[in-house]
Amino acid sequence: MPTSTMTSKGRLTVPKRVRENLGLKAGDQVTFVEQADGSFLMLAATSDIRTLKGCLPPPAKGITLQDMRQAVVRRALRTAVPKVRRS
């Protein structure tokens, strides 16, 4: 099992085998995800957005640009205008 020692400044060297398996290069970022049992999962946070293509099914119904604009306006009005309470 690969291990690493933390420096006094809180830095770790990711072992070569781990870097290779995660596809990490200099300058890449990693994300630490806390699990329910208190352990952490280390994930490469460098994936290209294009890798997500196809992970969701296509929408059942298309949406127009006008529909999107109206949805944005409705949401903006709902969050920007405080509701007035009447006694």
Image: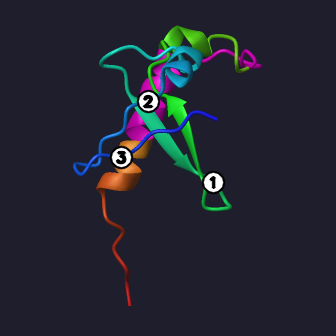
Per the image, the residue denoted by label 2 is 14
| Residue 37, visible in the rendered structure | yes
Which label's residue is closer to the chain start, 2 or 1? 2
Q: Residue at x 52, y 38 (%)?
A: 3
User: Mark 3 to mark 2: distance in Å?
Assistant: 10 Å
Residue 59 falls left or right of residue 32: right
- Give yes or no for residue 69 being in the magenta stretch: yes
The magenta stretch spans which residues?
57-74
Per the image, the residue denoted by label 3 is 6
Q: In which quarter of the image is residue 25?
A: top left
Q: Is mark 1 on a helix, strand or loop?
A: loop
Q: Is mark 3 on a helix, strand or loop?
A: loop
Pick the front one: 54 or 35: 35
Q: Residue at x 44, y 20 (%)?
A: 46
- Give yes or no for residue 50 being in the magenta stretch: no
- The amino acid type of the residue labelled 2 equals Val
- Give the numbered dot on residue 60: none
